[in-house]
Image (cartoon, rainbow, N blue to C red):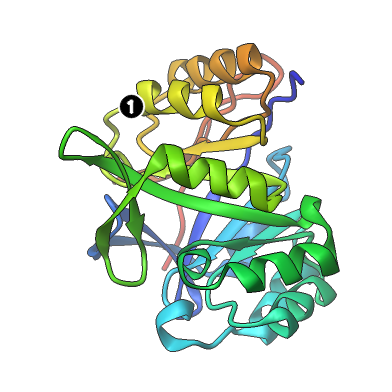
Amino acid sequence: MDERRIIPILQLENGRFVKTKKFDLRNKTYIGDPINTLRIFNEFQLDEVVILDITASKLKKISIELLRDIASECFMPLTYGGGIQNLKDAENIISVGFEKISFNSQYLRNSTLISETIRSLGSQAVVCSIDYGWLDGGYRIFDHLSRKFTNIELENYLLQCTDLGFGELIITNIQREGSWEGYDIEGIKKICRLTSVPIIANGGAVNQTDAQKVFELSADAGVSSSVLFLKNESGVLVNFPFERRNQLELTYND
């Protein structure tokens, strides 16, 4: 498969979009109001948008009305992750207009819920968001809920995700996320070798060259890719690594 997609990942916190750095919730920047932001994103020729609520899991509450409003304004396919406690939550998210749901830390604790959701919605609608980093000489899985690294090796986790039947993986090196230090190319290479599940690579992108490196990796591995969403002091910067798409810079009025 040589499908190359541009998919910004937007972090939702208390009803607004923010951008963190290295997943540190104390180090985040306000991006914009969700509805106004997505109205602008409708003009970008983006392929999909991923919205991850970074507070919903802790609060165990999904803002379903906000998600309904978001889906009504967004012209692109939508993926949502955060705070999904049961199959009804997942089905409700799909019912208001989202195409996919994403599980992260919940999968570490409740694989039965994942299996039930895949049976109900189909694997194409269920995504696993994998947060990982380098620790003690190897790649380890990071648990978003506890905010700590686990003892789970990335290789074993990928095999479990593949066996369980996830239709797609969002992979984020938390040590690169929001850092402008470049993608974790070695980690992405490793992941591409270990699974045939389509991959969205996220974390650390600097420019179009970074995106092209990931596209080349994923194309060689027969895996679809990728995400590029950046933030700097002057606003949101979205880079499109194709000649038909221009580099755009947006600023938001608070």
Residue shown at 53% from the left, 30% from the top: 239
Q: Residues within 10 Å of mark 1 (few under 14, many from 20)?
A: some
**According to the image, label 1 marks what residue?**
182
Residue shown at 35% from the left, 35% from the top: 204
Q: Nearer the viewer, residue 129 or 247?
A: 129
Under tag 1, what secondary structure?
loop
Q: Amino acid at mark 1?
A: Gly
- Rendered location of residue 102, percent (x, y): 61, 60
Residue shown at 71% from the left, 65% from the top: 115
Residue shown at 33% from the left, 27% from the top: 182
Q: Is residue 169 above or below residue 208?
A: below
Asked whether residue 87 is in view, the answer is yes
Q: Is residue 138 left or right of residue 194?
A: left
- Rendered location of residue 61, percent (x, y): 53, 88
Q: Nearer the viewer, residue 1 or 47?
A: 1
- Rendered location of residue 59, percent (x, y): 43, 87
Q: Is residue 143 above or below residue 61?
A: above
- Rendered location of residue 201, percent (x, y): 51, 35
Name which quarter of the figure residue 44 lies in: top right
Q: Quadrant of the N terminus?
A: top right
